[in-house]
Amino acid sequence: MPARPRQPQEASRSAKAGLHPRNRHATGYNFSRLVTASPELRRFLQRAPHGGDTVDFTDPAAVKALNRALLAAAYGIQGWDVPPDYLCPPVPGRADYLHHLADLLAEGNGGAIPRGAGVRVLDVGVGASAIYPLVGHREYGWSFVGTDLDGVALGSAARILAANPGLPQAIALRQQRDRTAIFQGVVAPGERFAATLCNPPFHASLREAREAAQTKWRKLGRAAASSARNFGGQGAELWCAGGETGFIRRIITESRTLADRVLWFTSLVSRSAELPGLRRTLQQAGAVEIRVVPMAQGQKQSRFLAWSFLDEAARKAWF
């Protein structure tokens, strides 16, 4: 699901209301530090109406430059880039998912966040940006397997890893060859994961995705015919048959085959109205524990759905 466009005014140190307390971006953007880490950002800086610096969040090049600076300054990631028109995710919100996931994993570990390469996480739809593995490894030392249908996206992710010593050993990339499968074909026999995560495609068709993009641009006072999107997105990133809910139901169906090999399955859910139906699907699938973890970034409310087929004793024994 591509993130919603944000308003173009944002002061350099404005607080990000609702972000997780461990989120490095919770106090806002320090543009002086960001420009030091990535000097190319300087040419995109503007003066915010209420003082301080900002960038135009409707400008794809500015958003990409900001992401590159954030990843360099906060996580030491070098050479980050995504091909034109691929999803360019907002770093603070993606980091929040990982921090809340860490809290969930801590519940079965005596309240301590499990850290290190022994904590293995599967990212369904790693994308060209590899954002979750990059941030998750830097924050907690976790090792990742990132899967994707798109060979171009995986090539982009591989280039980012290659530009950062140690990352190719910590993050594995695997191409999903079957468009109807989630875990089958990319998870090896006997392979175990502490968690899976996913940012599922939001729309049910390409037409729906295009109409939504045009609506966003009209609201921002831009030409509806503009093909650019501030966060980009290719077909598999934006839409699939059945939309977001259909994709999550597929994850649920396949998760039963890995019931004893994954501690927590998780996925972002953009529409809270879909949660009751998804909960019923999980109950029918035999999930033992179901959670909805709320998140927020400013006025934007989000959440992820988490489920486990393991009882409390098994979850506590996992680590």
Image (cartoon, rainbow, N blue to C red):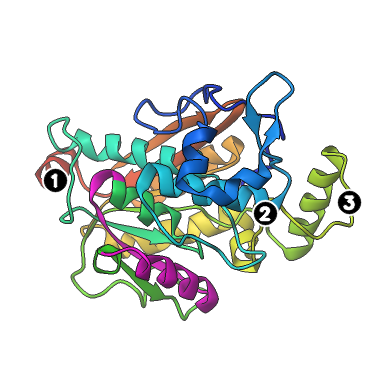
Badge 2 marks a residue whose secondary structure is helix
Task: Identify which amino acid the numbered label 1 is placed on.
Answer: Ala
Q: CA distance from mark 2 to mark 3?
A: 19 Å
Q: Earlier in the sequence, mark 3 or mark 1?
A: 3
Q: Earlier in the sequence, mark 2 or mark 1?
A: 2
Query: In this figure, which residue is indicated by the disc labeled 1?
Result: 314
Query: In this figure, which residue is indicated by the disc labeled 3?
Result: 224
Specify whether residue 150 is painted magenta.
Answer: yes
Q: CA distance from mark 3 to mark 1?
A: 52 Å
The location of residue 89, given as percent across then percent down, is: 55, 50
Q: Is residue 295 left or right of residue 273?
A: left
Q: Residue at coordinates 74% horizontally, 22% vertically from top-left? A: 49
Q: Is residue 133 left or right of residue 33?
A: left
- Extreme-bottom residue of the structure: 177
Tell which tag, 2 or 3, sits nearer the viewer.
Answer: 2
Query: In this figure, which residue is indicated by the disc labeled 2?
Result: 61
* Residue sitting nearer the eye, 249 or 3: 3
The location of residue 117, given as percent across then percent down, is: 18, 56
Badge 3 marks a residue whose secondary structure is loop
Q: Which residues are magenta?
A: 139-165
Above or below, 114 relative to 152: above
Can residue 251 be seen by looking at this rendering?
A: yes
* Residue sitting nearer the eye, 122 or 73: 73
